[in-house]
Amino acid sequence: MTLSIYNTMTRAQEAFVPQQQGHVKMYVCGPTVYDYIHIGNARPVIFFDVVRRYLEALGNEVTYIVNFTDVDDKLIRKAEQLGTTVPEVADTFIAAFNEDIEALGVNKATRNPRVTDHIPLIVDFIQGLVDKDIAYESGGDVYFRTNKFAEYGKLSHQNTEELQHGIRIEVGERKENAQDFVLWKGAKPGEIFWPSPWGDGRPGWHIECSAMAREYLGDTLDIHGGGHDLQFPHHECEVAQSESLTGKPLARYWMHNGYIHINNEKMSKSLGNGITVRELLKQIKPNVIRYFMLTTHYRSPLNFSDDSVKQAENSVERIANCVSNLRHRLSSLNADAVSSQGAASGNHALDGRLAAIEAQFMAKMNDDLNTPDAVTALFELVSEANGVMLQQDVTAGELNALLALIEKFDRILGLLPVQDAAADLLDEQIEKLIIERTEARKAKNWARADEIRDILAAENIVLEDTPQGIKWRRK
């Protein structure tokens, strides 16, 4: 079975075939860097990280572009509030974004182009539309003529009348039609600006993605992604301006993730129920957030609540405990843990069951990245591992095969806690303390044994007695 993806453009699930075999060009709209990212921003960040990981697991090279919008009205207002400059605001929150996604176990994009580094490129793009009479200058602004693009509305599946509803010409604008959208905004006094053939100003929101996607991925992308809220107007306008300039499809497949609700209410500034990733990470482990995001299909709404988080915490702990127990049993057999793309256990019956679980996992991922059912397959594997570990005559080959498959799944989903080199050193220290505590108890040095117990408790280390000796885990 090959990968199939639901294409927003066609409203159908289609077999995924990249333009170049073995190479996927993917663009996902990134954040406007005027503040810390919130949980709604985290959903596409995590989901498209999994898409990229899975495409790579299938043997593809993925060129993955995620832009930074580092100049717009929000950044200008933020700079005014903080008494600083727009570039300084952008630098601050780009650094915060990178810290937050690293904490969430998200791999960095191939490139994160910034709008302000591509102004000449954007101006050239707009000039191309002006030269074709598809865009026009009015009072220092430049607008796109939507009536020049006959298919305007094809992505969001709205007709011209529906698009007209609710649109108004704002005071000071001189659009030919209310639907026309801005490509270049003339600078107001005191605002950051760049020179252009139409006067000093800055790019409109939609044009930046068209220009930068074309620069790094060519005229036609394999996948263009983002949140459901970007279908209209942002992605609709991207389609119109890009395809008007190049005469080619902007993207072969469009993917959009659903909204996030907070306690069954849509997250919005007006309700004051937004939660930043930074705040969330103070309360919830990163892999719990990833698990929560992946146990609802990406196109469906996702409801964030205390109950859902608690369920995610319990589930992630079950996976982590299974892996910890596998490694502990391997150490008790004096066998090295093996992490590989796959391994035979030497037990034909077990190998057959593992092959069936792997086939189930792959089938669900191939079915429009169905991560909830893929996670179900992962838990079948966890149950299998827990059962095998109960056997007294379990072999290192069996344990290694189970561990290898769990880790193979996790290279796609990213649900196991990530430990850096410093944490690994800490693990060694903990092992030494446990050995020292065991020796102290044998020597009836209760004071030292209690002291070590208190040290471990302060590190949130839980000790467990097993037939193979004492094992430990973090809370």
Image (cartoon, rainbow, N blue to C red):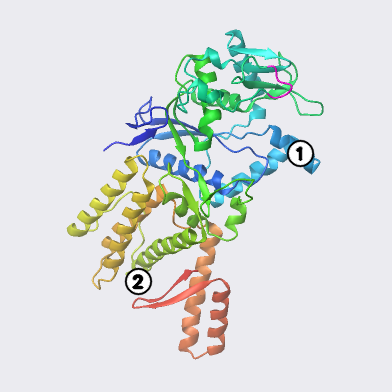
Q: Nearer the viewer, residue 173 or 308?
A: 173
Quadrant in which residue 115 is drawn: top right
Q: Position of residue 338 (x, y in %)?
A: 35, 57
Note whether residue 278 is visible: yes
Query: What predominant SS class does the magenta segment belong to?
Result: loop
Position of 365 with respect to 216 (left or right) is left
Query: What residue is at 65 percent from the left and 44 percent from the top?
Result: 95
Q: Nearer the viewer, mark 2 or mark 1?
A: 1
Q: Which mark is residue 332?
A: 2
Stretch of the chain drawn in magenta: 170-174
Q: Nearer the viewer, residue 392 or 335?
A: 392
Image height of 119 relative to 59, above or below: above
Quick one: SS at disc 1? helix
Note whether residue 107 is visible: no
Q: Nearer the viewer, residue 342 or 463?
A: 463
Q: Which mark is residue 79?
A: 1
Question: Mark 2: which amino acid?
Answer: Ser
How many labels, in total?
2
Q: What is the crowding at mark 1: few (fewer than 14 residues within 10 Å), some, or many (at least 20)? A: some
Q: What is the crowding at mark 2: few (fewer than 14 residues within 10 Å), some, or many (at least 20)? A: some
Position of 272 with respect to 336 (left or right) is right
Question: Mark 1: which amino acid?
Answer: Ala
State the quadrant of the N terminus: top left
Image height of 111 relative to 276, above or below: above
Quadrant in which residue 416 is drawn: bottom left
Q: Position of residue 431 (x, y in %)?
A: 48, 72
What's the CA distance linking mark 2 and mark 1?
59 Å
